[in-house]
């Protein structure tokens, strides 16, 4: 698997994989929707698949001494690394933004707090759960995977932001930079990570099962 | 020693069926896998390698069942679908470096020797290579991990006659040590005449014939005669019959020679055999 992951980053990665990681600097834009930079991560993952198709990555990989399911597993691991790196880069920038704009918070959506990062993992989960199994139904219809995953993440985004925008005890709990509340938001982060790991596993299982049926 | 055995390989598509393909290949030989376009050559090879899911059948490589020992089998196989056409913007050096990591028996010294022998520049990108160079690079990758069985899908298609000849000579060089075997599909008859030891003929998804080249050639005769000589009895025995205003021409099986006594018979070459069989 180490070799396959090496292949993913050495051959399959697209320049936007790295370029869009830099977009976490958008965290520093005052009152800007926090999910946007993570949307770009999803877009860069789409570009990896698109470039893979144009470069016949699947044909190259399946001829190597690996199983078909390993092709899916390697790509899933690559996506996991990219998504985690983006979160890792975004956290310190969110802390910095919160320090800089603490007086106002984020007026364009949820504050960049612990609950937000938990929600980011759920956002990723919605993308992974749709994009990976749908792409591996054919191994080449990357546009289909993008359309359905876009619908999934937009619906998730609307639902998540509604919880913040519609005034309620929940919105007060979620949309705050109060350190005491942020500690209470920790279960959301933990739940987000657990769901992300579980859905990744499921997305891999379904993707690998779909890909197994594909005649190349 | 049997290096490859394919038994009853079946694959059903809506408009095409691979009908129980079986053949085997011994160590140290070259087998040409022939048939017209769409006969099932690529489907067979892809089904053997699990790229296409066969509906039935068994493939053994070096005595190991391919389905259960896929990784071990692939270590010993070099499989090429034409030449290298993946990652066209990557340098050969990069592709070789990544590929080498997957093979326990990768031999970098051999790789360098092959690159030199094939006059391939590792700093070139894949799309800077000619069709012949791409095939040679594929072979360099396969031979550098000591693949003993090369399965090549139409390696000579699109090559000029000189490059084709070079490649076929290379195939012959490779099997001389008695350790390598080559199965290659083609619809270019002269390839087989130059280097195949065995010929497996596939038509409409079914194996029509498996034999050594000389026996295969000796199995048929070309026949021609006047319209009067083409009586009802023998007409049914003519393969790929073509009637014209001066008479007829076609091909017969060697076993039917007695029935054609007095007609003009001539040895058939591979091209004629294929044309007459496909005309049926």
Image: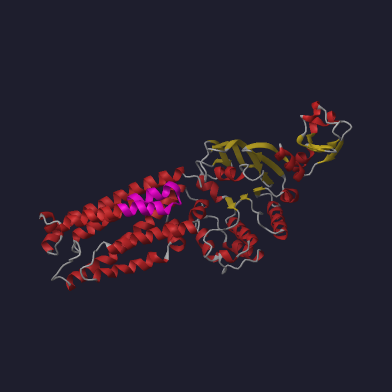
Position of the C terminus of chain B by quadrant: top right
**What range of the chain is rendered magenta?**
A129-151
Position of the N terminus of chain B by quadrant: top right
Depicted A1 relative to depicted B46: above or below:
below
Residue at 45 percent across and 50 percent down: it is A139
Residue at 24 percent across and 53 percent down: it is A192
Q: Percent position (x, y) of residue A55?
A: 50, 59
Q: Is residue B229 left or right of residue B63?
A: right
Q: Decide which of B224, B170 is in the foreground and name it.
A: B224
Q: Is residue B119 left or right of residue B96?
A: right
Q: Percent position (x, y) of residue A59?
A: 51, 53
Depicted A116 relative to depicted B274: above or below:
below
| The residue positioned farthest toward the front in the image shown | B245
**Residue B136: quarter of image:** bottom right
Q: Is residue A85 left or right of residue B146?
A: left
**Residue B138: quarter of image:** bottom right
């Amino acid at each position: 698997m180490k070799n396959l992951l090496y292949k993913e980053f050495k051959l399959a990665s697209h320049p936007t994989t790295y370029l869009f990681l830099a977009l976490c600097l958008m965290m520093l834009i005052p009152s800007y929707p926090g999910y946007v930079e993570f949307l770009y991560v999803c877009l860069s993952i789409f570009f990896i698949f698109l470039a893979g198709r144009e470069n016949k990555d699947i044909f190259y990989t399946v001829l190597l001494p690996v199983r078909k399911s390993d092709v899916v597993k390697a790509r899933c691991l690559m996506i996991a690394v990219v998504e985690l790196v983006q979160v890792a880069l975004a956290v310190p920038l969110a802390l910095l933004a919160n320090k800089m704009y603490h007086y106002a918070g984020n007026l364009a959506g949820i504050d960049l707090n612990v609950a937000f990062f938990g929600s980011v993992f759920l956002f990723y989960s919605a993308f992974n759960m749709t994009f990976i199994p749908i792409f591996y139904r054919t191994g080449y219809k990357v546009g289909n995977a993008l359309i359905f995953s876009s619908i999934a993440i937009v619906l998730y985004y609307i639902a998540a932001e509604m919880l913040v925008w519609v005034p309620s005890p929940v919105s007060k709990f979620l949309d705050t930079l109060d350190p005491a509340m942020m500690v209470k938001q920790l279960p959301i982060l933990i739940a987000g990570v657990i769901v992300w790991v579980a859905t990744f596993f499921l997305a891999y299982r379904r993707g690998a099962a779909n890909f197994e049926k594909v005649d190349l | 020693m049997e290096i490859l055995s394919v038994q009853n390989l079946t694959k059903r598509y809506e408009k095409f069926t691979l009908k129980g393909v079986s053949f085997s290949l011994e160590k140290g030989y070259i087998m040409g896998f022939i048939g017209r376009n769409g006969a099932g050559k690529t489907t067979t090879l892809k089904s053997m390698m699990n790229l296409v899911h066969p509906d039935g059948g068994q493939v053994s490589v070096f005595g190991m069942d391919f389905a259960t020992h896929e990784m071990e089998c692939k270590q010993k196989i070099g499989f090429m679908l034409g030449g290298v056409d993946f990652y066209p913007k990557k340098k050969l050096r990069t592709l070789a470096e990544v590929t080498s990591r997957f093979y326990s028996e990768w031999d970098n010294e051999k790789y360098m020797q092959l690159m030199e022998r094939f006059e391939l520049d590792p700093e070139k990108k894949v799309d800077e290579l000619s069709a012949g160079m791409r095939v040679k690079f594929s072979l360099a990758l396969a031979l550098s991990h000591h693949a003993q069985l090369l399965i090549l899908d139409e390696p000579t298609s699109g090559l000029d006659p000189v490059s084709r000849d070079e490649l076929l000579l290379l195939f012959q060089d490779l099997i001389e040590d008695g350790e390598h075997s080559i199965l290659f599909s083609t619809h270019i008859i002269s390839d087989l005449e130059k280097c195949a030891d065995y010929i497996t003929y596939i038509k409409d998804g079914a194996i029509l014939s498996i034999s050594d080249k000389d026996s295969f050639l000796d199995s048929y005769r070309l026949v021609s005669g006047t319209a009067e000589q083409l009586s009802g009895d023998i007409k049914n025995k003519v393969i790929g019959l073509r009637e014209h205003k001066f008479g007829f021409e076609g091909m017969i099986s060697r076993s039917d020679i007695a029935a054609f006594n007095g007609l003009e018979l001539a040895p058939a070459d591979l091209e004629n055999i294929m044309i007459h069989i496909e005309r049926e």
